[in-house]
Image (cartoon, helix red, strand yellow):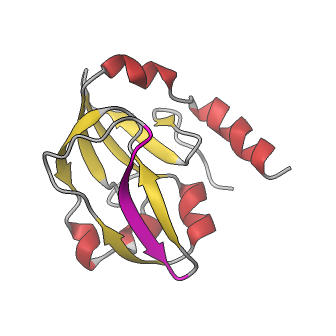
Amino acid sequence: MSDIPADLKYTKSHEWVRQLDDDDVLVGITDHAQELLGDMVYVELPAEGDMPSAGEECVVVESVKAASDIYCPVTAEIISVNEALVDQPELINKDPYGEGWILRLKASTPDELDGLLSADDYAQFIASETE
């Protein structure tokens, strides 16, 4: 398993969250998730301005193995999406924590970020899933 960046927060559904300021965050899927899914072939992005709740499905990714939902980690407004993924969904495989980001959100309830997993907690969660 590859390194889990310590500066990010994580969900049990394998999304990562990078806090940009008090309530702006970037969201993507973890390296672990993209390895499980395999080569990405399609990403269905939501509309900017959508306001999903924490835990709500907000993106669909399709790989050579399966289609999978990506969940919004916090209640938020979608302020931008990574349009590059429309033509290059494989960016999620190549650089899941960088160019493969999926959403930029403005968290409605920034306190929800406190409930996300640390890198160590996420590593333990993955280990418990594979036991």
Q: Position of residue 87 (x, y in %)?
A: 25, 78
In the picture provided, is 6 more to the left or to the right than 56? right
Seen at 49% across and 77% down, the residue is 63
Up-down: is 40 above or below 123?
below
In the picture provided, is 66 more to the left or to the right than 97? right
**Which image quarter holds the N terminus?**
bottom right
Q: Splitting the image into 4 quarters, where does residue 128 fall? A: top right
Residue 94 visible in image: no
Up-down: is 82 above or below 85?
above
Q: Position of residue 116 (x, y in %)?
A: 51, 28
Q: Position of residue 102 (x, y in %)?
A: 32, 55
Q: Position of residue 60 (x, y in %)?
A: 39, 64
In the picture provided, is 1 more to the left or to the right than 106? right
Residue 123 visible in image: yes
Seen at 55% across and 75% down, the residue is 66
Up-down: is 13 above or below 86?
above
The region drawn magenta spans 55-64
Q: Main secondary structure of the magenta part?
A: strand
Q: Splitting the image into 4 quarters, where does residue 76 fall? A: top left
Residue 58 forms part of the magenta stretch:
yes
Up-down: is 95 above or below 58?
below
Seen at 19% across and 65% down, the residue is 83
